[in-house]
Amino acid sequence: MDAASLVAFVRTELRQRGDSTRAEAMAAYMKTDMPFYGVGSPARREVLRMVRGSYAPSDKDDYRTAVTALWEGPSREEKHLAIDYAIAHRMFVKPAALDLYRRMVVEGAWWDLVDPVATHLIGSLHRADPEAMSKVLGKWIVSDDMWLRRTAILAQLKHKHATDRDLLFEFCLTCAHESEFFIRKAIGWALREYAKTDPDAVTTFLQEHRAELSGLSFREASKHLDMAT
């Protein structure tokens, strides 16, 4: 797999599907100066389908090289495709790539890039080896980097019955005092999602810690629970 050819192919396909007017609107919505081609998610998925077969990695080194090459592209869509590509090749979502995923969280530094890495890549690593990854996330939850803290909270979002409830609650309480919107929202989102699996546990947690949680976190978490807000 030739990473340079992969990037050239992706840029050609994005350019053909791009819309300059839409690109401006997308950049404004994301509040970023990063350039966009103006390619929406459906069209981006078409590009991913094309590269999954033609530019599939043969080993973990190919995987890292391809993801890195796409990630280092200047456009937002290239970064999204780097994440999509990383997720699509699940056989290479292994601890050896953890430093790469961490880099993507720190450099991405916005919800549209961070959240899929947190839930699909870091989350997959945690589900595969909860003990080892809980130690990693235990460091991230007290990191100075807000996006690493958000990632730690959201890493179990897709776990359902495999969720480490105590860890989730611990992380929510660790950051409950924060005024940062993206942390408060993440706490509410993570609890709301887990409430679909264990509503009684989340209800009890919210009742016991209501005074510690922000109004936003509480409202989000209790949205589908029978609780007074």
Image (cartoon, rainbow, N blue to C red):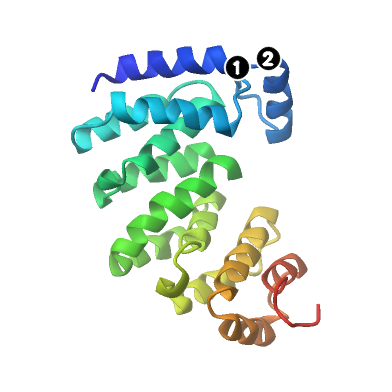
Q: Locate residue 123: give its quadrant.
A: bottom left
- Is residue 153 something that shows in the picture? yes
The residue indicated by pointer 2 is 20
Residue 199 pos. (x, y %): 60, 81
Does 87 sit above or below residue 222? above
Q: What element carries label 1?
A: loop
Q: In which quarter of the image is the N terminus?
A: top left
The residue indicated by pointer 1 is 18
Q: What element carries label 2?
A: helix
Q: Quadrant of the C terminus?
A: bottom right
Does 205 sit above or below residue 143? below
**Furthest residue in direction left, as rendered:** 59
**Furthest residue in direction right, as rendered:** 229
Tell me if 138 is positioned left or right of 129 in this view: right
Residue at horizontal 43 percent and vertical 19 percent from the top: 10
- Is residue 71 something that shows in the picture? no
